[in-house]
Image (cartoon, rainbow, N blue to C red):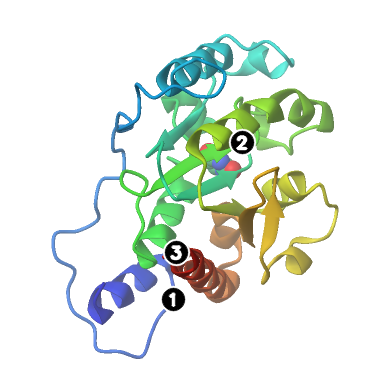
Amino acid sequence: MDRAARAEYLRAIGIELWVPRHPPEGGPQSEAAPVPVPADAGATASDGHSVDARWQALWSEVRDCARCPLHESRTQGVLGVGNREANWMVIGEAPGAEEDRRGEPFVGRAGQLLDAMLRAIGLSRGANVYIANILKSRPPGNRDPKPEEVAACLPYLHRQIELVRPKLLLAVGRIAAQTLLSSDAPLARLRGGVHHFGERNTPLVVTYHPAYLLRSPADKRKAWEDLKFARGVMAQIDGDRT
Ligand code: URA
């Protein structure tokens, strides 16, 4: 990505750089890209079911889920979006009003900021990122998830992570970070380092939730540091494998 494009994306996030500005070409991209059919849809996993069949089973379970009372107030379950073979997996908290209505994670204002943040490091949900949440159902009034809701829903996310097998997890916000790391440390202590998740020890980096950044734009610069850090971690992972 050239410097002008990066500066433009950073400006969209709300970070000004002291570089000459160029007008954007085209305008913002539409991010509501369809979920690509995975290239290994016919591949068979160790349990004997094809990867595609496992995605289908997961989706129908989430669609019909009644494991916690949130199913009574939600419009629909929200599973995930993006490339199912992505190297990057972003994990947020729970669907909000717009996500509940449209059935896709991060499509409201916070989602637009998330897309801009991802673009700033050369990523997009249609191409090289898969996005999911800790909860698949919207908590009323966007309150914090209750521990029993997280406990009921988390197995779905574990299955998603196992299906995508990302090289790097990016946890956005306190709820996602604390849940995935089984920690009650504040976000400030979880940022700035590489953690590991699950049996595969998948590297995990923590940053701010875009909804928080909309309320506290002064922290966008720190989020940008986190994204550059995550990009460096991914470069190192790729370097280690070549
Ligand atoms: N906030 C989240 O954490 N996830 C969404 O999908 C939308 C807003």
**Among the 4 quarters of the image, the one containing residue 62:** top right
- Does the beta carbon of the residue at mark 2 sit less than 8 Å from ligand 1? yes
Residue 79 point in image, percent of width and height: 51, 27
Residue 195 point in image, percent of width and height: 70, 60
Q: Is residue 209 above or below residue 226?
A: above
Looking at the rendered image, the disc whose residue lies closer to the viewer, 2 or 3, is 3
Residue 12 point in image, percent of width and height: 36, 66
Whole-angstrom CA distance, mark 2 to mark 3, is 30 Å
Q: Earlier in the sequence, mark 1 or mark 2?
A: 1
Q: Is residue 217 above or below residue 54?
A: below
Q: Pick the residue in front: 174 or 158.
A: 158
What residue is rendered at 27% in x and 81% in y?
3
Looking at the rendered image, the disc whose residue lies closer to the viewer, 3 or 1, is 3
What residue is rendered at 67% in x and 51% in y?
201
Report the residue marked by disc 2.
94
Report the residue marked by disc 3.
238
Pointer 2 with pointer 3, Cβ within 8 A: no
Mark 2 Cα shell of 10 Å, populated few (<14), some (14-19), many (≥20): many
